Amino acid sequence: MAPSLFIGFLLVTLSTSATPLNKLQHLRYKLDGAMHDETAEVRKTVVTLTDNYEGFVVMLDYHRNLLTIKNTTDQTCFFSRLDKDRFNEKDVSPVFVTEVPNSFVIGKTEPDVEIIVLSAKERIPTDFAVLTSDVTVAEQCTGLTSYWLVEESTGQRSLDPTAVAKRWPKIKIKIKICIKIERD
């Protein structure tokens, strides 16, 4: 059984509204003792978040309402419906991603974290990325093993900026969302 993925999104502003322009933003931050070097790129209505430390790419396709997560280590892509309420295009979040064992249980979390559990139960045909995706997603996922993610359950919590400021006083970043992906 393959390991699960635990994904946390950090909040910064990167607007994709109005005229779609190509933009590039870099972010370097320390989290849980590890330095993260991340890139956020906007191409038309697709935001690509690359965590160079963990080796994951997250693509938010606002035109097609598609969330894509690519594991660059094992060359696997995961697709899900993009929930625009959670992934607001006016406040797009750079992402940190770490693999955890299947036995990993999401325990007590910070009060500012919303948990979403997605399961990769269904494999997607190889040509899905080419036929249905933006060119940005197709470039990343064509020919790779892909899975469709289904939401299993959520733990709704409101964000508490004060709790985040206490934990990381030197950086003005809020944890917005965490995702655990379980795949067989």
Image (cartoon, rainbow, N blue to C red):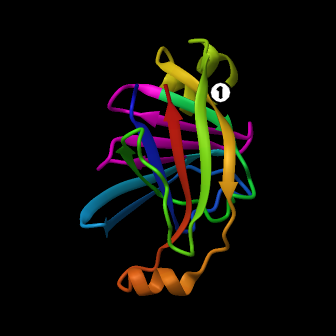
Specify few, some or many for label 1: CA neighbours under 10 Å numbering under 14, 14-19, or 20 or more: some
Q: Secondary structure at mark 1?
A: loop
Give the answer, above or below, for where 15 lies relative to 158: above
- Quadrant assignment for the N terminus: top left
Q: Is residue 60 magenta?
A: yes
The amino acid marked with disc number 1 is Ser
- Horizontal and vertical percent for residue 66? 68, 38
Q: Is residue 62 magenta?
A: yes
Q: Is residue 76 left or right of residue 85?
A: left
Of residues 100 and 41, the one drawn nearer to the viewer in this rendering: 100
- Give coordinates of residue 111: x percent, y percent: 56, 75
Residue 129: x and y in percent read 60, 21
**Residue 140 appears in the figure:** no
Look at the picture and state if 169 lies above or below 21: below
Question: Which residue is painted at 63% across and 17% down in the image?
Answer: 128
The residue under the point 46% across, 34% down is 70
| x and y, in percent, of residue 178 in the image | 54, 56
Whether residue 36 sits left or right of residue 96 in the image: it is left
Residue located beneath label 1 in the image: 133
The magenta segment is 48-76
Residues 43 and 5: in front is 5
Classify residue 80 by image quadrant: top right
78 vs 52, nearest the viewer? 78
Determine the image quadrant of residue 17: bottom right
Where is 59 relative to 126, above or below? below
